[in-house]
Image (cartoon, helix red, strand yellow):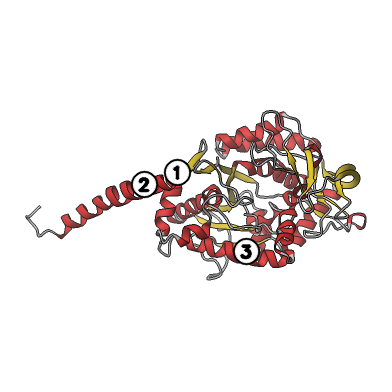
Amino acid sequence: MGDISEIGNEDTAAPKLPIPGKRNVLITSALPYVNNVPHLGNLIGSVLSADVFARYCRRRGYNMIYICGTDEYGTATETKAMEEHCTPQQICDKYHAIHKEIYEWFDISFDKFGRTSTPQQTEICQAIFQNLWERNWLSENTMQQPYCDTCNRFLADRFVEGICPTPGCGYEDARGDQCESCGKLLNPIELVKPRCKVCRNTPRIRDTEHLFLELPKLKDRLEEYIKFMSVVGGWSQNAVQATNAWTREGLKPRCITRDLKWGVPVPLEKYKDKVFYVWFDAPIGYISITACYSKDWENWWKNPENVELFQFMGKDNVPFHTVMFPSTLLGTGENWTMMKTISVTEYLNYEAGKFSKSKGMGVFGNDAKNTNIPVEVWRYYLLTNRPEVSDTLFTWVDLQAKQNSELLKNLGNFVHRSLSFLAKPSGQY
């Protein structure tokens, strides 16, 4: 376990603020969905990687904070609540506590581990939206969306499943927002043989009005930011590739609203029955969680001259942090602290397949805790097996081999020899 100089000060000390003349570092890791238990891929993909960097920064004497929390709004929470026959708020309360307990066991040194279902999230998200609306960066448009006559409701992306339309993929359980197999971002109406996740019936397509962020109009500002910051911040190669793939395809208006109940309400009378799409409001969660940490949150988030922002995540989250979120902040015209450096991991796979929360495949945080294997062993193994440039594989055999040969044998032998040497009387070396 880390000593006091290495751990965060969550809920134990006065909030830290940027200090003039010092290096001020703001660290975030991707907000984990609250609808399930985090697995080892989630841990190494964001929170553990960021934790190592946070400890490094503290050792170097930098003035820094490490911010994270559970992403609690959206379709995933509503569907999980349906599965467990409870309310979305009850789901959030239950799984937030589970996440927090697991990260505490893994010795993750957050300065603040919060959540997005807070008044601060609603206030900041709606303020950013109003700014974009007044500056004409948003548009209204009619889009086609699956409607389930059995459930009598429009089906948001994750309420629809079907066959992935991407050539060469054909995954049969692709979601309406993204294919878990090939990683391609999707729209629900693109799925082949779509079905309602709740009743399994085939939905029909109906028109519904939504709000869109006009990414094409922000293209020049965004590309200028990407071109400059990707070099200055030393973005990882996989982050650059994923970002360029998005921009090469041509930026299109991106829908920022959903026909849901559980989320930040859209503050317009015409859209009062809609909420913000989770990938519009989720990155704003970094800001609102900081606001829960300190009432002077703007000193961190509207202070680009004195604060460096480092963000950690898995590769499937890249476009939302290098395209969507920066475009949102640039569109407000305010002096936001923009991401300087992004550290991205590939996938950590499990045995013969992928980690999957929805399928319960892999080793989850509570599983690791229940093995009685010390947390230091888990941290060591995940970090040495970190998928930095390509996918890596977790196997129980490899975990055992690394523990026995690298930790017990090599490190143990080094410690034993060193202590034996020190214990010998002078002159008997």
On the image, the x and y values in percent for residue 343 come to: 55, 43
On the image, the x and y values in percent for residue 245 come to: 67, 31
On the image, the x and y values in percent for residue 310 come to: 57, 48
Mark nearer the viewer, 3 or 2: 2
Regarding mark 1 in the picture, which secondary structure is present there?
A: loop
Residue at the spot x=49%, y=43% of the render? Answer: 351
Farthest residue in the left direction? Answer: 427
- Tell me whether the residue at label 3 lies in contact with that at label 2, contact meaning CB atoms closer than 8 angstroms: no
Please report whichever mark, 3 or 2, sits nearer to the chain's N-terminal start.
3
On the image, the x and y values in percent for residue 394 come to: 47, 45
Q: Is residue 282 above or below residue 164?
A: below
392 or 239, which is in the foreground?
392
> From where the camera sits, is residue 103 visible?
yes
Spatial separation of the CA atoms under disc 3 and disc 2: 32 Å
130 or 238, which is in the foreground?
238
- Tell me whether the residue at label 1 lies in contact with that at label 2, contact meaning CB atoms closer than 8 angstroms: yes
Residue tagged by mark 1? Answer: 385
Please report whichever mark, 3 or 1, sits nearer to the chain's N-terminal start.
3
Please report whichever mark, 1 or 2, sits nearer to the chain's N-terminal start.
1
Q: Residues within 10 Å of mark 3 (few under 14, many from 20)?
A: many
- Tell me whether the residue at label 3 lies in contact with that at label 1, contact meaning CB atoms closer than 8 angstroms: no
Q: Is residue 247 above or below residue 287?
A: above
Spatial separation of the CA atoms under disc 3 and disc 1: 27 Å
Regarding mark 3 in the picture, which secondary structure is present there?
A: helix
Q: Which mark is residue 402?
A: 2
Q: Which mark is residue 96?
A: 3
Q: Amino acid at mark 3?
A: His
Q: Amino acid at mark 2?
A: Lys
Regarding mark 2 in the picture, which secondary structure is present there?
A: helix
